[in-house]
Amino acid sequence: MSAVSEAAPGKVRARGAVRARPPHDGAAAPLAPRARLLPALSAVYRAQLSRARVARIPLLFVATFQSVGIMILMRGVVDGGDEARAVVAGSSVLVVAFVALNLLAQYFGQLRASGGLDHYATLPVPPAAVVLGAAAAYASFTVPGTAVTAVVGSLLFKLPLAHLWVLAAVIPLSGAALSGLGAALGLLAPRPELATLCGQLGMSAALLLGVLPAAHLPEPVVWARDLLPSTYGVEALARSFDARPDWLLTAADLGVCAAVGVVSLAVATWAFRRAAVR
């Protein structure tokens, strides 16, 4: 009996320890700290890259074939010189505009309309990481198509290939400017149809104002061309085909692309915050 009576309190205490609950003082449980920008940006970039790999690769082929087809058509009316440089450079940057501007505007427009922004709003990641990660993923898909278009165009118009390494700066800087513009258009458009329309119009502007030589355009159209971010990427790439490129002007054009990219991505981040809280 004594052994049972001594063991019983131990069992009672053990059961009581299992059922015991911390006192409720009304304080909410602390939330996990928000992720830092760079790790969050890397995670969003990898997720977007794997998501868009299957869906966007066929469209990348379409963009590349479209640009190569334009150069073949222009080959019948352009022999060489500054006009050939403009055609090849404009067709190459057009691949960036098709993916980074057009497709990204459609993506964010559909994401806003379907309520997909609510998913990102619940994640402990900065809004800038979402916008920059998606923009970087879409811009990454333009690298092979732009490089192929530039090489094919150079061979088609017999332009030098020695300075095509400029693409290493033209693609990311033009991609940043056009991706930020595309994301802002998609997030600010009230309906996904309008986002698609704005993306298509932006790509058409990059086609008409980038591929056609500026010397043959009316003066008002030249002013509109100067307002298009992709123009400066086209000018930088076109100068690389010269025997002795003016690297100072090339750097200035790339600097404009970088500045427009910073501003447009900042506007897209603000538009993301605005759309996510509604």
Image (cartoon, rainbow, N blue to C red):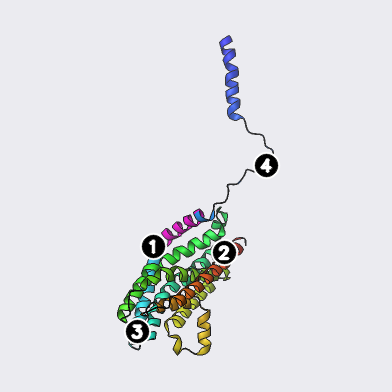
Asked which secondary structure carries label 2, the reply is helix
**Quarter of the rendering containing residue 160:** bottom left
Name the residue carrying label 1. 54
Q: CA distance from mark 4 to mark 2?
A: 33 Å
Q: Quadrant of residue 3?
A: top right
**In-image side of 93 versus 224 (left or right):** left
Residue sitting at 58 percent across and 48 percent down? 33
Cα separation, mark 3 vs mark 4, equals 70 Å
Judged by its main secondary structure, the magenta piece is helix
Amino acid type for the residue under numbered disc 4: Ala
Q: Earlier in the sequence, mark 1 or mark 3?
A: 1
Identify the secondary structure beneath mark 3. Answer: helix
Q: Which residues are magenta?
A: 39-52
Q: Secondary structure at mark 4?
A: loop
Instruction: Give the number of the mark in front: 3 or 4.
Output: 3
Whole-percent x, y for residue 214 in the image = 45, 86
Q: Secondary structure at mark 1?
A: helix
Amino acid identity at mark 2: Thr
Question: According to the image, label 2 marks what residue?
Answer: 269
At 46% from the left edge and 71% from the top edge, which residue is drawn?
174
State the residue in front, 275 or 202. 202
Residue 50 included in the magenta stretch of the image: yes
| Cβ–Cβ under 8 Å for marks 4 and 2 | no
- The residue carrying mark 3 is 73
- What is the CA distance from the residue labelled 1 to the residue labelled 3? 30 Å
Disc 1/disc 2 C-alpha distance (Å): 26 Å
Which badge, 4 or 2, comes first in the chain's sequence? Answer: 4
From the top left corner, tell me how far across and down residue 21 is, in percent.
63, 32
* Residue 83, quarter of the rendered image: bottom left
User: Mark 1 or 2 closer to N-term?
Assistant: 1
